Amino acid sequence: MFDNLTDRLGGTLKKIKGQGRLTEDNIKDTMREVRMALLEADVALPVVTEFIEQVKVGALGQDVQTSLNPGQAFLKVVQAELVKVMGEANEALNLRTNPPAVILMAGLQGAGKTTTVAKLGRYLKQNEKKKVGVVSADVYRPAAIKQLETLANDQELMFFPSEATENPVDIVNRAIDAAKRQFMDVLIVDTAGRLHIDDEMMGEIKALHAAVNPIETLFVVDSMTGQDAANTAKAFHDALPLTGVVLTKADGDARGGAALSIRQITGKPIKFIGVGEKADALEPFHPDRIASRILGMGDMLSLIEEIEQKADKKKADKLAKKIKKGKSFDMNDLRDQLLQMQNMGGVGAMMDKLPGMNEVPQDMKDKVDDKHLARQIAIINSMTRQERKFPDLIKGNRKKRIAVGAGQELQDVNRILKQHKMMQKMMKRFTKGNMSNMVRGMKGNMRGMRM
């Protein structure tokens, strides 16, 4: 996510980090490069101009000048300004109203609106413990109604049916009445999208908004359209009282222009960001965390939250007790670890949130392929119960049989056996209660393993 911007800014800011003193002369070149990096990231020109001006003022200010490490202080100024541009802090949904709280979703066709309705429903159900209903008022695309029904069923959300022959206002009013009777906390309304903004579309969504008076009106926009995303959001905001923006497809956006432009151009906060195709790939938008990611500092808070939400706590406790009793870490345990990593989106999804990833060479990043996880799991599944419990049994012919059964090469089987040995050693250090030993072991393992 935003890789191009991260690489450009990382390289530029590294040059100034080592400076013993900052002057107008030695930050001039840096600011020119930062400006170019932002423009290449498709950030809107007025936003770039304001950003550069504010950073320059901060960099030449008293706090930076008297700092023991002016280069790092300058980096803090850039980070603070990035946060400011994107909105200071996450703004949560306002659901304080008589239930059901109606959330109206607007946006152009192809932005991922219908998928986002289901993702948001799942998020509110899982994280906010809300009873959520969804309804489609998209009467121009009959497939949209069926699509939402399928997605709602997958996430166990209440789906309120509608027909392409009906009036959108009648559809939503009927859904609100039904949601009240079924004691729903939230009703999310999917609306019709168009390929471009037109008077007919705006007139229809204005009438719908006036009729149902939603507590939240969210504009769903494709991150990969760059500053056009901000301009489209502004056009919608001029017609509708938007309360926030949902930025989709950010995992495929190497630039980041939309994330950095929307708040300043529309005045409206980005409330959520879509980071993948899976149903759980929707995160609250935290400007401070995104700024850290852009500057290559990682986003450990989001990673920890994700692990807490998606990790199987029962299995983790069971493994901890097993290791404490001195029992060995076997192939079943390794498979559980790999499955949990897969559940969290794989190594690629986690890398984005780890500090210092901008310093890892691109050719190394390109070698990260989450299909390896599936292959490793297949190899373990190809083992017998006894082999999984006692991996030392796996020699010559057994290795060949496992490789054939998993459709993999012999070297792949050897690789996973080696990986298991390394993790087993690490777990033994853990049982001895010597944390420094364990940390040393982890460092040694990391040096010994390829990316």
Image (cartoon, rainbow, N blue to C red):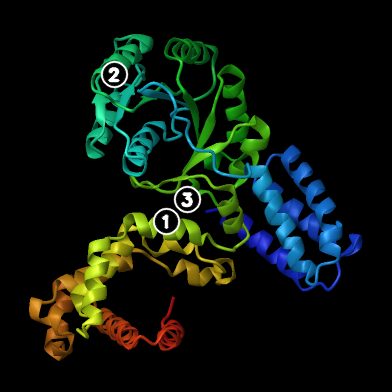
Q: Earlier in the sequence, mark 2 or mark 3?
A: 2
Q: Is residue 407 visible?
A: no
Q: Are marks 1 and 3 in contact (CB under 8 Å)?
A: no
Q: Which residue is mark 2?
A: 180
Q: Position of residue 250 (x, y in %)?
A: 50, 47
Amino acid type, callout 2: Lys
Q: Quadrant of residue 298?
A: bottom right
Q: Which residue is mark 1?
A: 305
| Closer-to-camera residue (239/69) | 69
Q: Which residue is mark 3?
A: 251
C-alpha span from label 1 to label 3: 18 Å
Q: Earlier in the sequence, mark 2 or mark 1?
A: 2
Q: Position of residue 69 (x, y in %)?
A: 78, 71
Q: Position of residue 358 (x, y in %)?
A: 58, 66
Helix, strand or loop status at disc 2 = helix
Badge 1: how crowded within 10 Å, few (<14), some, or many (20+)?
Answer: few
**326 on left or right of 245:** left
Helix, strand or loop status at disc 3 = helix
Amino acid type, callout 3: Asp
Residue positioned 29% across, 63% down in the render: 340
